[in-house]
């Protein structure tokens, strides 16, 4: 599966099969997490076979079932752009999971923060988690705002690579599907900015990763 296929096929999945993540998949995820941490200075962690984090009223209300594995997005509070960085590297792992046949859901609200088994050292913050497992189903495409509401570059002036990036940005998961971002172009550089609102900085990192992975162009 290519990265673009992973972007198109990824949807939030909250109901999982009651089976453990295969050892080979776990190894690949652990290796990617190590790479992400080395590159970013984050402290991302894969936690397996720990159902308590999703054993809360909120999680049941959100219809999570057999959610026993998660990636904890943790990092130093001193990083000014911690939420954005967490979104960016978390999405890299989400797409890798998709290529391995795993399903995911970003979760910032409907989990038990106090029950999360991640190691959060002094000076670190738990930004959110990503539940991960083999889905009962593959999920479905989210409703989207029209491209013209998410991008201020007129269609006729969008280069081919930019169109690919924009499509991937539109397919990106955002908290409560809010899509509070704007994609623009400064010369040849794609620029993505977050609007005001809760969790829009995490969303921004996610959207930037999708754009870059599909277009091959680094965003500002
Ligand atoms: C930062 C962030 C936080 C989220 N928090 C939750 C959550 O607490 N509970 C939940 O059920 N879904 C949560 N989601 C999933 C979104 O509802 C979902 O991504 C959005 O509706 C778009 O759907 P899709 O992921 O299937 O494309 C979150 C997504 C993001 C990006």
Image (cartoon, grey):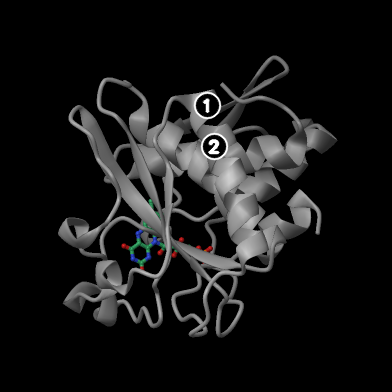
| Percent position of residue 50, x then y | 34, 68
- From the viewer's perspective, is residue 187 above or below residue 67? above
Mark 2 and 1 residues: CB-CB less than 8 Å, in contact? yes
Residue in the picture at 80% in, 35% down: 161
- Image coordinates of residue 114 in percent, x first then y, are 16, 57
Residue found at x 32% / y 21%: 79
Secondary structure state at the residue bearing disc 1: helix
Q: CA distance from mark 2 to mark 1?
A: 6 Å
- Toward the right, the furthest residue is 160
- Taking the image as shown, residue 142 lies to the left or right of residue 79, namely right
Q: Which quadrant of the frame does ligand 1 lie within?
A: bottom left
- When the figure is inspected, residue 105 is found, relative to residue 220, above or below; the finding is below
Q: x, y (%) of residue 42?
A: 41, 31
Most foreground residue, 122 or 172: 122
Where residue 141 sits, quadrant-wise, is bottom right
- Please rate how many residues cluster around mark 1, counting C-alpha atoms within 10 Å: few if below 14, some from 14 to 19, many from 20: few
Above or below residue 201? Residue 106 is below
Q: Quadrant of the N terminus?
A: bottom right
Front residue of 50 and 70: 50
Please name the residue shown 41% across and 60% down the image.
Answer: 70
Residue drawn at x 41%, y 33% as measured from the top left: 84
SS for callout 2:
helix
Instruction: Name the residue beneath numbered marker 1.
Output: 38
Circle on res. 119:
none
Q: Position of residue 220 (x, y in %)?
A: 56, 21
Q: Is residue 106 visible?
A: yes
For residue 34, the mark is 2
**Relative vertical location of residue 92 with respect to residue 146 in this rendering, above or below:** above
């Amino acid at each position: 599966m290519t990265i673009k296929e992973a972007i198109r096929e990824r949807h939030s999945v909250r109901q999982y099969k009651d089976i453990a993540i295969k050892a080979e998949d776990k190894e690949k995820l652990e290796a990617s997490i190590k790479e992400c941490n080395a590159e970013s200075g984050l402290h991302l962690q894969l936690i397996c076979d720990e159902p308590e984090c999703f054993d809360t009223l909120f999680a049941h209300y959100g219809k999570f079932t057999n959610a026993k594995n998660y990636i904890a997005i943790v990092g130093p509070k001193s990083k000014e752009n911690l939420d954005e960085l967490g979104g960016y590297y978390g999405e890299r792992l989400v797409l890798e999971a998709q290529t391995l046949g795993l399903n995911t859901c970003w979760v910032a609200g409907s989990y038990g923060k106090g029950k999360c088994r991640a190691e959060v050292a002094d000076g670190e913050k738990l930004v959110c988690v990503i539940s991960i497992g083999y889905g009962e189903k593959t999920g479905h495409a989210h409703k989207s705002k029209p491209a013209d509401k998410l991008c201020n570059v007129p269609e006729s002036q969008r280069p081919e690579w930019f169109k690919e990036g924009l499509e991937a940005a539109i397919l990106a998961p955002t908290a409560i599907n809010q899509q509070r971002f704007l994609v623009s172009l400064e010369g040849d550089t794609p620029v993505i900015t977050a609007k005001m609102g809760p969790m829009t900085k995490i969303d921004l990192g996610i959207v930037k990763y999708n754009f870059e992975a599909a277009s091959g162009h680094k965003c500002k």
